[in-house]
Image (cartoon, helix red, strand yellow):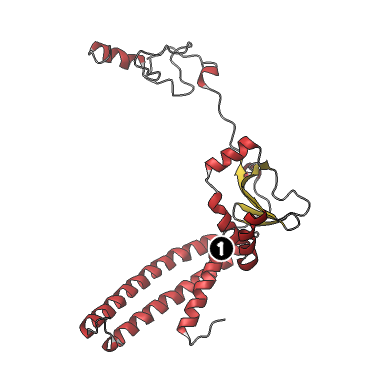
């Protein structure tokens, strides 16, 4: 709880509260709750701007007491005034950020969140395994989980996530699941796109990441039936442009290895002696 008189204690509590918010705001079970969070942040930014201005004022008012580590009063005053100036600049930037936050707050207030997404937005998603630890290897993340909570445990285990490399390895080895925690005694905690799975009976911990199935790849160009070409001037398009082939048969690769160069450009190069 804030003291309203102990700046050191209140600053420490504000820092810890923001740290907690940074973790908690990775995901919202109820998106409508974001509107209230933005409003509280707006209020907090106004207070932050005021605090920066007031601390700058104190640096100026107390400059007569300022010395540097070598005992120079002149240098101490110079640094106190420099700190005041930088703090005022920071306050001005916070003021500008608050204006942008206010606009976001207004836009957020116009959103009506529905419990179910629109049909066209539904994308199939599964879960890929990032890391699985058991026995002594699981002791550290389990300790973090018990002491600091699941968000910090997820942060610790996320160091094993190498992005596309991890996804590809999981796909190749079959470590892909319809939902996290399919075991009988599995306990699941979500943090953003991660799922922490703990089984206290077997003594293991694992981290999974949400994986969205990619859309079906288009057919290769050579497998697509060419569209009939209407009479008219020939267009300089390459075979890398789908749906606009210049002839029905696939091109014969040139000696220089280029498949995509239009015939007219090749003819100009040959006439100028640019290709052999």
Answer with the quarter of the image where residue 81 lies.
bottom left
Placement of 108 over or under 206, stated as above or below: below
Residue 69 placement, left or right of 98:
left
Secondary structure beneath dot 1 equals: helix
Q: Residue at x 60, y 51 (%)?
A: 193
Residue sticking out furthest to the right: 184
Q: Is residue 12 above or below residue 183?
A: below
Left-right relation of 111 to 80: right
Q: Give the total number of marks visible in the rendering.
A: 1
Q: Position of residue 205 (x, y in %)?
A: 66, 54
Q: Pinpoint residue 161: horizontal percent, then vertical percent.
A: 55, 48
Residue under label 1, please give it: 23
* Residue name at image x 52 percent, y 72 percent: 16
- Residue 226 % position (x, y): 51, 16
Q: Position of residue 152 (x, y in %)?
A: 58, 62
Q: Kindly tell me whether residue 216 is visible in this rendering.
A: yes
**Residue situated furthest front in the rendering:** 136
Q: 27 or 127, which lies in front?
A: 127
Quadrant of image for the C terminus: top left
Question: What residue occupies the far left of the structure in this picture?
Answer: 74
* Residue 29 sits in quarter: bottom right
Q: Residues within 10 Å of mark 1 (few under 14, many from 20)?
A: some
**Does residue 224 show up?**
no
- Looking at the image, is 40 positioned above or below residue 163? below
Q: Quadrant of the N terminus?
A: bottom right
User: What residue sits 65% from the left and 66% below the top?
Assistant: 146
């Amino acid at each position: 709880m804030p003291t309203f008189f102990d700046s050191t204690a209140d600053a420490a509590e504000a820092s810890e509260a923001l740290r907690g918010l940074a973790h908690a705001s990775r995901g919202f079970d109820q998106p409508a709750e974001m509107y209230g969070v933005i409003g509280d942040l707006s209020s907090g930014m106004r207070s932050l701007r005021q605090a920066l201005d007031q601390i700058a004022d104190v640096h100026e008012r107390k400059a007569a007491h300022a010395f540097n580590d070598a005992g120079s009063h002149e240098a101490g005053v110079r640094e106190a005034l420099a700190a005041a100036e930088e703090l005022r600049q920071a306050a001005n930037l916070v003021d500008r950020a608050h204006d942008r936050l206010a606009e976001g707050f207004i836009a957020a207030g116009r959103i009506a969140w529905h419990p179910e997404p629109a049909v066209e937005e539904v994308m199939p998603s599964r879960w890929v395994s990032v890391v699985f630890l058991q026995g002594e290897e699981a002791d550290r993340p389990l300790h973090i989980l018990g002491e600091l909570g699941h968000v910090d445990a997820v942060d610790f285990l996320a160091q094993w996530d190498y992005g596309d490399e991890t996804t590809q390895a999981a796909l190749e080895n079959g470590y892909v699941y319809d939902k996290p925690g399919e075991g009988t005694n599995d306990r699941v905690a979500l943090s953003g796109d991660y799922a922490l799975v703990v089984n206290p009976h077997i003594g293991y911990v694992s981290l999974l990441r949400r994986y969205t199935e990619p859309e079906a790849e288009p057919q290769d160009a050579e497998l697509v039936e060419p569209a009939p070409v209407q009479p008219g001037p020939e267009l300089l398009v390459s075979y890398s442009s789908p749906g606009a082939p210049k002839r029905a048969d696939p091109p014969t690769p040139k000696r220089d290895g280029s498949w995509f160069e239009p015939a007219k450009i090749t003819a100009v190069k040959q006439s100028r002696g640019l290709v052999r």
